[in-house]
Image (cartoon, rainbow, N blue to C red):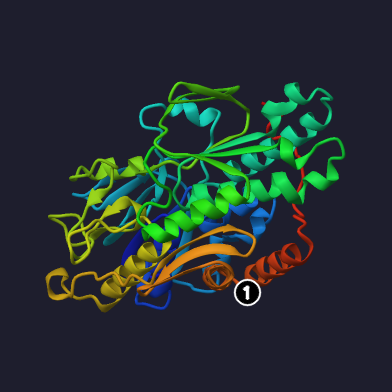
Amino acid sequence: MDSSKKTVVVVGGGFGGISVAKQLKKANVNVILVDKKNHHLFQPLLYQVATAALSPGDIAMPIRGIFGKYSNVRTVMDEVTEIDKNSQTIVLKSGNKLNYDYLVLAPGAQYNYFGNDNWSEHAPGLKTIANALEVREKILVSLEKADQIPDKEKRKPYLRYVIVGGGPTGVEMAGAIAEIAKRNMMRDFKSLSPEETEVYLVEAMSGILNGYPEHLSKKAQKDLEKMGVQILLDSPVTDIRENGIEIDGKFIETPNMVWAAGVKASPLIKALDCEIDKMGRAIVTKNLTIPGTGNIFVIGDAAHAKDEDGNPLPGLAPVALQMGKYVGNLIKEGKSIDKVNPFHYTDKGTMATIGRAKAVAKIRGFTFSGFVAWLVWCFIHIFFLIGYRNRFRVFAEWSWYYLTFKRGVRLITGRVTKK
């Protein structure tokens, strides 16, 4: 790398970090992209890995593969442990140090268990490939165990599934598991009946898909209930144990639990010694910088930024992508921070899939549901995948599933049984 050029250190290989690096891949700067893992993960489709619809490689791309042909972009697989704003240096877990002229933090978020972090052992979230494979393994192992138990009462726990959180991830997960349990895989287990399965979607508030128009929320709820999902509203979780979950005094015995109830920012943000909100996000300026600095940016799920109405921007992929593009262009142009227009987020819509040919969507003021919404959802998600290979593979898998109702990635590798 050219030592005469300014150095931009980007922390995080998610949507925001990759977006920044893409804007700078031909700029007159050195870019160092730091991430704990060696791959970019398309998290919106992670639940499909967990439900055996897609393979991990379908939704992940090695970061070095994305930027390999650009000489000014360097990839470092490591974890940031310290940030020294005075010396403009970050310290990595390996002990190495990196100097920066610009620092962009896009470390993402993690699931929030609201002070009960021990729950994560039994009810994993869906933030990493490892999480998704663990959930997939639990589902498949439970079906195998249930198939070997002749007594219907004794095998009931293995045929129960509980998803905590009624946001898009929880809704999509519940719908996918309902399809697995009541249609897709059950035909291969001769001693089991689809009627034996129970799928619960648990939400502490009074409705699912909060933030969506009310009629779409109700449509999603109705579709899920038709698929056999039991939706428990106003039902806060009080305890999670290895053999089940306690919800408002009621205990549901099952080993199959998934947490999708809330997120908090990466703990790395605390190293900035800046003002944070109750979710641990850095409160940034209109230019996405830390107050008092002109060269430290925080974007994506780790940033508390507001729209024109003063409302916090949601932790969605489109927000992170637009933030990354804004910051990348700002650095590339080299203008003083006080001479550029503030960040403006263009809301292009929100959507959630419920199951095969079922989805709800709000796009540019228009709302729709059903098959058309599902087609739009499929198109947009394929479009935002990185790499033509991944796009083709996902399209092929979805087409195969739509025509045959069969999910192909049903391998048990021992991730659960080895514990």
Residue position marked by numbered label 1 in the rendering: 388
Q: Nearer the viewer, residue 397 or 333?
A: 397
Q: Is residue 269 left or right of residue 348?
A: left
Q: Nearer the viewer, residue 49 or 333?
A: 49
Query: x, y (%) of residue 200?
Result: 56, 38
Q: Nearer the viewer, residue 83 or 210?
A: 210
Regarding residue 333, the answer to whether it shows in the image is yes
Q: Residue furthest right?
A: 190
Total marks shown come to 1
Residue at the image point whose x is 43% and y is 45% from the top: 79
Q: Quadrant of the C terminus?
A: top right
Residue at the image point whose x is 33% and y is 63% from the top: 8
Question: Where 103 falls versus 225 (above or below)?
Answer: below
Q: Is residue 277 left or right of residue 393?
A: left
| Residue type of the residue flagged with mark 1 | Tyr
Query: x, y (%) of residue 33?
Result: 43, 59
Q: Nearer the viewer, residue 236 or 388?
A: 236
Question: Where 343 falls versus 414 (above or below)?
Answer: below
Residues packed near mark 1 inside 10 Å, few (<14), some (14 to 19) or many (20 plus): few
Kind of element beneath mark 1: helix
Residue at the image point whose x is 56% and y is 28% from the top: 122
Regarding residue 418, the answer to whether it shows in the image is no
Query: x, y (%) of residue 318?
Result: 40, 66
Task: Give the quadrant of residue 266.
Answer: top left
Q: Is residue 359 left or right of residue 364?
A: right
Residue at the image point whose x is 69% and y is 33% from the top: 159
Query: x, y (%) of residue 67?
Result: 51, 69
Question: Where 403 falls versus 335 (above or below)?
Answer: above
Q: Quadrant of the N terminus?
A: bottom left
